């Protein structure tokens, strides 16, 4: 018999697998899932979050691969501000309009969800 802890969609299950004739024969799981462990608190933003009036948001969930712009830098519409890696692809997140970067709210290596604010600009 082997015991495993499995997390499915944020629910944690303790399961026991019994072997019969060298193959898994039965799986026993609790009727109600335990609460998933709480995630670590998010790190403080690298600059004042929401410092600018225009938000630059991630189009897809992934990991911050590279930060192309810096606070105070002038950017034109379409310039890459942050690059997010998702499914082994590098996806540039671009400035929606001309302006100045007011804050960069992520760091290289941060995991981000789709729609998360990565930076702001004026």
Image (tube, rainbow, N blue to C red):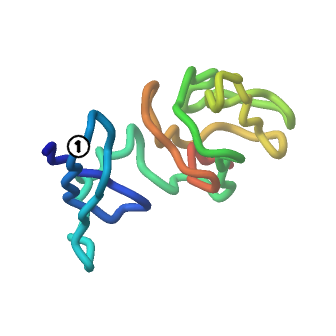
Q: Give the image location of residue 49, x and y in percent.
A: 45, 52
**Which residue is depicted at the point 52% across and 32% down?**
63
Q: Is residue 37 left or right of residue 52?
A: left
Classify 48 as above or below 91: below
Instruction: Return the residue nearer the eye: 15 or 81.
Output: 15
Whether residue 82 is visible, yes or no, is: no
Q: Is residue 43 left or right of residue 102?
A: left
Q: Give the image location of residue 3, x and y in percent.
A: 15, 47
**Which residue is depicted at the point 29% across and 44% down?**
43
**Which residue is depicted at the point 67% across and 48% down?**
56
Q: What residue is pinned by disc 1?
A: 19
- Number of callouts in the render? 1
Classify 92 as above or below 36: above
Q: Give the image location of residue 75, x and y in percent.
A: 76, 30
Q: Give the image location of residue 91, x and y in percent.
A: 73, 29
**Which residue is depicted at the point 76% across and 40% down?**
99
Instruction: Return the residue nearer the eye: 27 or 85.
Output: 27
**Viewport quadrant of the N terminus:** top left
Q: Is residue 71 left or right of residue 8?
A: right
Instruction: Return the residue nearer the eye: 119 or 11.
Output: 11
Residue at the farthest bottom position = 32
The secondary element bearing badge 1 is classed as strand
Q: Residues within 10 Å of mark 1 (few under 14, many from 20)?
A: few
Q: Is residue 12 left or right of residue 52?
A: left
Instruction: Return the residue nearer the eye: 2 or 66.
Output: 2
Q: Which quadrant holds residue 73? A: top right
């Amino acid at each position: 018999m082997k015991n495993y802890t499995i997390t499915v969609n944020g629910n944690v299950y303790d399961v026991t697998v019994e072997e019969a004739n060298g193959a898994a024969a039965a799986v026993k799981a609790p009727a109600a899932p335990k609460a998933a462990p709480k995630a670590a608190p998010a790190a403080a933003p690298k600059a004042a979050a929401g410092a600018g009036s225009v938000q630059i948001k991630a189009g897809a969930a992934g990991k911050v691969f590279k930060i192309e712009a810096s606070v105070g830098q002038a950017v034109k519409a379409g310039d890459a501000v942050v690059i997010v890696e998702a499914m082994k692809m590098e996806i540039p997140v671009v400035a929606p309009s001309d302006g100045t970067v007011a804050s960069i709210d992520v760091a290289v290596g941060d995991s981000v969800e789709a729609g998360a604010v990565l930076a702001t600009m004026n």
